[in-house]
Image (cartoon, rainbow, N blue to C red):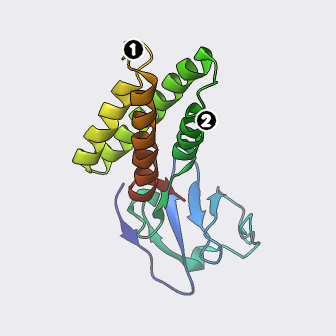
């Protein structure tokens, strides 16, 4: 898709071309609005805030991915929170064996996902640490250790999960 500038006549919105309609970003609230062909004299309005979107206020025509400032990185902490809570519960020695099997599935999945995000963000050393953590909690090929060693591993894993909540961010397009 080529970039084409339209002369600015007022405050603007950004438009993404699609097959049958355009997507306009409202400058007031940032909401995405689909603008299809409309009859002359009828002007589209923002579905969220109700402000008027007219051709006179269209500033630029390019894709949403090229829009500066519209992709944000947010901290993600829900997978880490789930893992930390489950690991804290695992410190209780009276849990049934099935709980530890379920813990392995959850921790392996969470740390594999976090490793993927770390590789995506080019934090390679931390990504490999997360891969090793996922392998330790692998539910298929189990590592058999004593309860004391697992308690120490669980404590270190809690620290790794908290560190990943601080360092890893997820891209969110708006």
User: x and y percent of residue 45 in the render?
Assistant: 73, 69
Q: Residue at x 51, y 45 (%)?
A: 80
In the rendering, at what x and y percent does residue 20 appear? 57, 47
Q: Nearer the viewer, residue 156 or 112?
A: 156
Whether the residues at callouts 1 and 2 have beta carbons within 8 Å, the answer is: no
Image point (46%, 44%), residue name:
158
Q: Is residue 78 positioned above or below 141 on the image?
A: below
Q: Is residue 27 left or right of residue 155?
A: right
Q: Is residue 99 above or below residue 161?
A: above
Q: Rounded to the nearest whole Å, what is the CA distance between mark 1 and mark 2?
A: 20 Å
| Picture quadrant where residue 71 is located | bottom left
Q: Front-most of 151 and 30?
A: 151
Q: Answer left or right for 98 relative to 136.
A: right
Tell me if mark 1 has few (under 14), some (14-19) or many (20+) residues whose alpha carbon lies within 10 angstroms of its own: few
Instruction: Tell which circle, 1 or 2, labels the residue nearer the N-terminal end.
Output: 2
In this rendering, would 62 be left or right of 85?
left
Q: Quadrant of the N terminus?
A: bottom left
What is the secondary structure assignment of the residue under circle 2? helix
Q: Is residue 25 above or below residue 114?
A: below
Nearer to me, 22 or 135: 135
**Residue farthest toward the top in the current orientation of the protein:** 141
Q: Picture coordinates of residue 21 (x, y %)?
A: 59, 52
Q: Nearer the viewer, residue 56 or 141?
A: 141
The residue wearing badge 1 is 142
- Residue at (39% x, 29% y) in the render: 149
- Return the residue at label 2: 89
Q: Position of residue 159 (x, y in %)?
A: 42, 48
């Amino acid at each position: 898709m080529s970039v084409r500038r339209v002369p600015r006549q007022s405050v603007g919105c950004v438009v993404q071309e699609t097959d049958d309609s355009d997507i306009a970003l409202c400058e007031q609230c940032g909401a995405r609005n689909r603008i299809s062909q409309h009859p002359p004299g009828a002007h589209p309005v923002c579905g969220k805030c109700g402000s008027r979107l007219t051709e006179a206020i269209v500033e630029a025509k390019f894709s949403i991915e090229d829009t500066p400032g519209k992709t944000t990185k947010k901290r993600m902490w829900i997978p880490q929170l789930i893992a930390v809570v489950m690991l804290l519960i695992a410190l209780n020695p009276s849990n049934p064996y099935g709980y530890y099997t379920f813990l392995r599935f959850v921790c392996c999945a969470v740390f594999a996902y976090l490793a993927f995000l770390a590789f995506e963000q080019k934090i390679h050393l931390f990504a490999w640490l997360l891969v090793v953590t996922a392998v330790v909690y692998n539910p298929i090929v189990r590592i058999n250790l004593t309860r004391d060693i697992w308690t120490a591993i669980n404590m270190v894993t809690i620290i790794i999960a908290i560190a990943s909540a601080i360092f890893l961010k997820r891209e969110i397009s708006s």
